[in-house]
């Protein structure tokens, strides 16, 4: 069964298309990445899935049904524009948000406590939200999203504002939940996160889908003519050494996409002796490279 | 319904725990109590001082009579005024100059100059350091008048006692007719109506602002979309408005308990300490006024709370809200400006019409109910119109609220807001 089935949705604001003819589906118990540059239409899409915005055209089915109010307690949603009541105590706030999901009583209290412990926030339970740091508030928001044990979790830019330690914690929890059969869809413009955890992706640019499907298949389809180079020295003349389609130079690190039929070994031979080579790796294109290739502009 | 209840519970508990609520609830009756008791206490407690007043009686026939009649007593039994006669020895100007000095030095508080021709219509002069004590001046002038008028009558060969019998002032008693019969009005109606209407006005504005601030806080803290992932905007709005209404009613309940306590024990408490205060009456409020007060608070509150909620949803900060709130607040201020007019002619066509117009009716109809119980049809139509308007507003505000809550950035223009209403 499909956890989310989006068919041809369109949302217009005046003459501006926020989302245009977008279709994708999310298999159950998988992690789905919604990618795209800022302003591509990711948040609008997610809000339409959550029924916060109503699409002008197209249909959306969530957990096999049309989205309705009573579905809301089966879904956990972390919006992009998120915050908490600043004057409320952390524990009270989580009890309130659980209450809104029809999750009450002793069980709710125990679940909240165990999540607070897992995120190292238990000692903050009786503190007011405004006393927490931004990162801590992010964690509380995540707890609020998952505490009622939803079947489907929708996260809009879940990693923004988290430090590496908490990013890893969040990633581990997401994979753990997938093991338990929970479906997760999240949006991001950070490619390395997607590569680590996504099964499937949909790349949106300028309101439309430009690439979608299984992540491994997408990478395979892009061919194995990608070279990762870590170097020291001047290689401005690299285009003379090989038939290069595209270069992404970061100074000491370079992603080179060779044209079809070009042998990477020739490039290695040409480079040898001219610069110091710390790493020369032939691999599938990174998602970053695909993203830049498809979107045609550098992401941040 | 469970979800609305969760929101009500949150709003209520968050609000009643704030310092503002606790202070306002306690200080409210304390301040009203002070307003009532302080003037009573001051007038009961203050004894006052004796005053020495000089008299230059150039006519030489008024002083004795005046001194006999200026028989005002202080609370401790002493004479309030001590009159001292000054004889004209040297020139008049010299005498006046020396008395002026005495006034400035505080030997006497003032002096009266009675001209020779006072019986024939000459002007009496009263000179003092300050002449703003209205009560003092009017009692001196009244006594002086009596003395001189009597002298005139005697000169004309008339009997002053007989004449004063004819000149007896007509008794004029005010009373109001109600369904229960005719009752005397001691002026309590005026005070009670005034206080009740002001309480209604202040609480409507106060709780409206609370709603406004609550909505803006939800928006600016970005918690609203998290909350809306669990319930509908209309449920959130309903919960918020009902929760704050419960806070308002709690406050009223506390005040009512205070009030009832005050009217049943307050009097005996005060008179226990100060027996002299027993003359002061605490006016009683008919039960139906209380009932209508609560009815109009609830209805008026719902009408204005939805408006404030809708405004809150379209802005990003309280500062931005102030402009938009103005017209709404004006609709509450306007009836207050008309209060005096309605009090003076509560049954005029204009008063009746104004008290039926929905946005004014909570304040003006309540005022008319306090003053004279209007006909059932008038009360009924004002309540019915108020309910209909509120229902319309809930629908209209709900539409704006739903879209506005998730709009950040630039404040929308009026045409944009009207467009929101048409979104499905």
Image (cartoon, coloured by chain):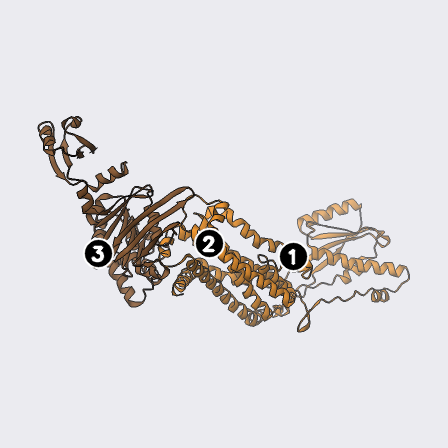
Chain colours: A brown, B orange
The image quarter in which residue A180 lies: bottom left
The subunit letter for the residue under badge 2 reads B
- The one nearer the camera, B122 or A245, is A245
The residue singled out by tag 3 in the image is A178
The x, y position of residue B137, in whole percent, is 72, 55
The x, y position of residue A283, in whole percent, is 14, 40
Q: What element carries label 3?
A: helix
Left or right position of B240 against B35:
left
In which quadrant is the N terminus of chain B drawn? Answer: bottom left
Q: What element carries label 1?
A: helix
Whether discs 2 and 3 lie on one chain: the answer is no
Mark 1 and 3 residues: CB-CB less than 8 Å, in contact? no
Precedes in sequence: disc 1 or disc 2: 1
Q: How crowded is mark 2: few (under 14 residues within 10 Å), some or many (20 or more)?
A: many
Q: Is residue B179 above or below residue B301?
A: below
The subunit letter for the residue under badge 3 reads A
The x, y position of residue B12, in whole percent, is 42, 62
Left or right position of A46 against A227:
right
The answer to whether residue A35 of the structure is visible from this angle is: yes
Specify the label residue B399 is tagged with: 2
The answer to whether residue B34 of the structure is visible from this angle is: no
Q: How crowded is mark 3: few (under 14 residues within 10 Å), some or many (20 or more)?
A: some
Whether discs 1 and 2 lie on one chain: the answer is yes
The residue singled out by tag 1 in the image is B340
The x, y position of residue A274, in whole percent, is 11, 27
The residue most toward the right is: B157
Left or right position of B95 against A107:
right
Label 1, label 3: how far apart the Cα atoms are: 71 Å
Name the residue: 30% across, 54% down: A5
């Amino acid at each position: 069964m499909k956890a989310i089935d989006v068919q041809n949705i369109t949302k217009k604001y005046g003459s501006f298309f926020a989302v245009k003819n977008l279709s994708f589906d999310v298999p159950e118990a998988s992690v789905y990445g919604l990618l795209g540059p800022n302003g591509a239409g990711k948040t609008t899409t997610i809000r339409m899935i959550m029924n916060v915005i109503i699409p002008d055209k197209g249909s959306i089915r969530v957990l096999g049904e049309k989205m309705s109010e009573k579905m809301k307690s089966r879904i956990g949603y972390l919006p992009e524009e998120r915050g908490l009541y600043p004057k409320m105590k952390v524990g009270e706030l989580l009890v309130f948000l659980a209450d809104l999901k029809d999750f009450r009583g002793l069980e709710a209290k125990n679940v909240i406590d165990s999540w607070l412990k897992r995120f190292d926030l238990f000692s903050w339970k009786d503190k007011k939200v405004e006393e927490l740091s931004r990162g801590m508030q992010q964690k509380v928001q995540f707890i609020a999203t998952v505490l009622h044990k939803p079947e489907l979790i929708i996260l809009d830019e879940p990693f923004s504002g988290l430090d590496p330690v908490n990013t890893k914690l969040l990633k581990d929890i997401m994979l753990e939940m997938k093991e338990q059969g929970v479906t997760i869809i999240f949006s991001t413009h950070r490619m390395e996160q997607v590569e680590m955890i996504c099964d499937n992706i949909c790349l949106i640019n300028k309101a439309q889908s430009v690439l979608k499907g299984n992540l491994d298949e997408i990478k395979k389809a892009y061919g194995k003519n990608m070279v990762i180079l870590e170097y020291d020295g001047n290689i401005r003349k690299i285009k003379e050494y090989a038939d290069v389609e595209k270069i992404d130079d970061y100074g000491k690190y370079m992603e080179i996409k060779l044209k079809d039929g070009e042998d990477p070994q020739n490039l290695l031979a040409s480079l040898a002796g001219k610069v110091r080579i710390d790493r020369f790796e032939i691999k599938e294109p990174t998602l970053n490279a695909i993203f830049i290739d498809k979107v045609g502009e550098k992401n941040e | 319904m469970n979800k609305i209840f969760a929101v009500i519970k949150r709003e209520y508990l968050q609000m009643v725990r704030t310092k503002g609520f606790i202070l306002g609830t306690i200080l409210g009756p304390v301040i009203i109590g002070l307003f009532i008791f302080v003037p009573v206490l001051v007038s009961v407690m203050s004894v006052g001082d004796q005053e020495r007043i000089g008299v230059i009686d150039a006519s030489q026939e008024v002083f004795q009579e005046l001194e006999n009649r200026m028989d005002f007593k202080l609370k401790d039994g002493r004479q309030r005024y001590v009159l001292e006669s000054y004889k004209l020895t040297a020139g008049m100007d010299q005498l006046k100059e020396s008395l002026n000095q005495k006034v400035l030095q505080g030997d006497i508080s003032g002096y009266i100059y009675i001209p020779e021709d006072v019986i024939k219509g000459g002007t009496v002069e009263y000179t003092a350091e300050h002449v703003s004590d209205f009560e003092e001046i009017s009692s001196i002038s009244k006594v002086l008048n009596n003395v001189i008028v009597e002298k005139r009558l005697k000169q004309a060969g008339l009997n002053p006692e007989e004449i004063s019998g004819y000149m007896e002032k007509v008794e004029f008693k005010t009373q109001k007719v109600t369904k229960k019969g005719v009752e005397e009005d001691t002026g309590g109606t005026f005070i009670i109506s005034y206080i009740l209407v002001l309480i209604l006005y202040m609480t409507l504005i106060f709780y409206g602002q609370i709603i406004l601030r609550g909505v803006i806080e939800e928006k600016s803290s970005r918690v609203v979309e998290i909350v809306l992932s669990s319930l509908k905007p209309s449920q959130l709005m309903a919960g918020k408005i009902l929760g704050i209404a419960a806070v308002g009613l709690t406050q009223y309940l506390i005040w009512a308990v205070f009030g009832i306590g005050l009217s049943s024990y307050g009097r005996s408490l005060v008179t226990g300490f100060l027996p002299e205060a027993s003359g002061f009456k605490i006016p009683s409020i008919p039960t139906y006024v209380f009932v209508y007060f609560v009815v109009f608070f609830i209805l008026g509150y719902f009408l204005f709370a939805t408006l404030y909620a809708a405004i809150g949803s379209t802005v990003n900060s309280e500062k931005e809200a102030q402009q938009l709130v103005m017209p709404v607040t004006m609709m509450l201020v306007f009836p207050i400006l008309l209060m005096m007019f309605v009090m003076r002619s509560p049954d005029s066509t204009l008063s009746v019409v104004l008290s039926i117009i929905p946005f004014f009716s909570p304040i003006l109809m309540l005022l008319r109910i306090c003053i004279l119980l209007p006909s059932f049809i008038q009360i009924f139509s004002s309540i019915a119109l108020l309910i209909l308007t509120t229902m319309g507003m809930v629908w209209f505000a709900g539409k704006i609220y739903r879209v506005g809550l998730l709009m950040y950035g630039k404040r929308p223009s009026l045409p944009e807001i009207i467009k929101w209403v048409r979104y499905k």
